[in-house]
Amino acid sequence: MQILHFDIKPHNILLDENFNPKVSDFGLAKLYSVDDNIVSLTAARGTIGYIAPELVYKNLGGISFKADVYSFGMLVLEMVGRRKNLNAFADRTSQIYFPSWIYDRLDQGEDMELGDISDDEKVMIRKMIITSFWCIQLLPSDRPSMNKVLKMLESNVELLEMPPKPFHQLPLETSTEVHNYENFNDEENVIFTRIMTCETPNQASDRLKEEFKGTERTRQQQLLNLRRDFENLKMKEE
């Protein structure tokens, strides 16, 4: 048997007394046979920001262990950026969606602006970013297995090929039911629904900023509320 976790994110990676990472919270996990390549679900499950697109959208491919690969890639990008991947209040508009911003800088050979780091750390970060972008490719078939991911992280960075930019227009028709979430109030449900129907990450960022218009106090409160709800959000099977 194999396990699909469906909720890989920073909150669910714990460290033991020797600082070894341990995956926790298997509440959304699903057991399936090693002989099965595709898993059947009646409803999408996961946490916004880490959930693989094929869990929500049609025509991207079947649901498999590649969903956890996608979540892992998003988690690693947040480790690199030391911030949430989506931040409506970033200093510059281009930095609102971190994966898109860092891809462009890496692809164009520009400084990644990640602070005072050594040359060895720059090499490791570059390796982590390239590997992450392979993990978050839109189509599951384009993502590596976790065994391949480990080999990429252990290989020479010069041997890693830069993947295609993983941000494409998403189909709007959902493949599984997406429930209203118990942690959202009515207004936030509306905001979330609008963001989920955006066609690209940049459009989602613009929509998020638009929803936050108002006084600075209101903006900060809305941000705190949505951050709280996004962090606790889980898509539960009926």
Image (tube, rainbow, N blue to C red):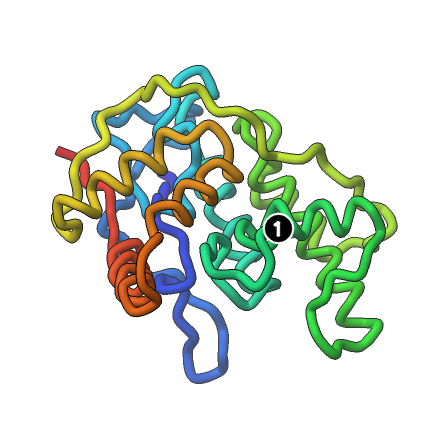
Does 45 appear above or below 92? above
Residue that badge 1 annotates: 94
Q: Secondary structure at mark 1?
A: helix
Residue at horizontal 57 percent and vertical 25 percent from the top = 141
Near-viewer residue (223 or 233): 223
Near-viewer residue (122 or 84): 84
Does 120 appear above or below 177? below
Residue at horizontal 67 percent and vertical 35 percent from the top = 165
- Which residue extends farthest front? 215
- Which residue extends farthest right? 158
Residue at horizontal 81 percent and vertical 72 percent from the top = 120
- Quadrant (top left/top right/bottom left/bottom right) for the C terminus: top left
User: Where on the picture, by quarter, is residue 51?
Assistant: top left
Category of crowding for the residue at label 1, using alpha-carbon neighbours closer than 10 angstroms: few (below 14), some (14–19), many (at least 20): few
Residue 151 seen in render: no
- Residue type at mark 1 is Ser
Q: Position of residue 15 (x, y in %)?
A: 43, 75
Does 116 appear above or below 34? below
Total numbered circles: 1
Q: Position of residue 46 (x, y in %)?
A: 31, 44
Q: Position of residue 183 (x, y in %)?
A: 15, 53
Q: Position of residue 104 (x, y in %)?
A: 72, 45
Residue at horizontal 29 percent and vertical 38 percent from the top = 31
- Quadrant (top left/top right/bottom left/bottom right) for the N terminus: top left
Task: Left or right? Give the position of 136 relative to 163.
Answer: left
Task: Left or right? Give the position of 38 relative to 158.
Answer: left
Residue 15 seen in render: yes
User: Where on the picture, by quarter, is residue 76?
Assistant: bottom right
